[in-house]
Image: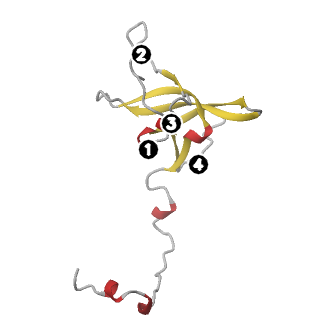
Amino acid sequence: GRGEPYPPNVITACYVRKGPFFNNEADDGEEKMPVWHWTDLHVEQHFRTDCLHPCTVEKRHGETEGGKVAWKYDVVVIVDDDNGGGEKSAIVTGIPHEAIRFFDKPYASHLHIRRAFRHHIGIPDDIVPPLWLETSSL
């Protein structure tokens, strides 16, 4: 198999506006995973921090726009259910490349390496304003 294409310390997140994702039920009463198509309509509403959700890229496909190939992705996005139902998944198709971001998993960046080399940064006292050196007022 192809396995996971990204290193284990990385997660993907997608800019997706929460829509009416969870109103779909299958014929047997079971809830099915909703499918939503990413549109460029109201694009400024997509690229907000409250629209950034964890996602998993499932498929990549090229679409020709203006003579150039624009990569689009189909993803499974995880969003919080506004009705208190916890996290739920939805399939979102046609997400543009620029709407997908990579982030370090919590505590996985180099800042958190326990045995990392740390060196004292010596700054001469004469370049620091005297007010900064006064600790008695703290």
Which residue matches tag 1? Answer: 49
Q: Amino acid at mark 3?
A: Cys
Q: Position of residue 67 (x, y in %)?
A: 77, 33
Q: Quadrant of residue 63?
A: top right
Determine crowd level at label 4: few under 14, some 14-19, many 20+ residues with C-alpha closer than 10 A.
few
Label 3 element class: strand
Label whose residue precedes the other's in the sequence (4 or 2)? 4
Q: Which mark is residue 55?
A: 3
User: Quadrant where the C terminus lies?
Assistant: bottom left
Q: Residue at x 62, y 39 (%)?
A: 97
Rendered location of residue 24, percent (x, y): 41, 15
Mark toward the viewer: 3 or 4: 3
In this view, the mark in front (4 or 2): 2
Q: Amino acid at mark 2?
A: Asn
Q: Earlier in the sequence, mark 3 or mark 1?
A: 1
Q: Closer to the observer: label 2 or label 1?
A: 1
- Taking the spot 45% from the left edge, 62% from the top edge, the residue there is 112
Q: Is residue 1 visible?
A: no
Nearer to us in this view, 107 or 81: 81
| Disc marking residue 7 | 4
**Residue furthest to the top:** 27
Q: Give me the residue at 48% from left, 69% from top.
A: 115
Front residue of 53 and 118: 53
Inter-mark Cα distance, 2 to 1: 26 Å
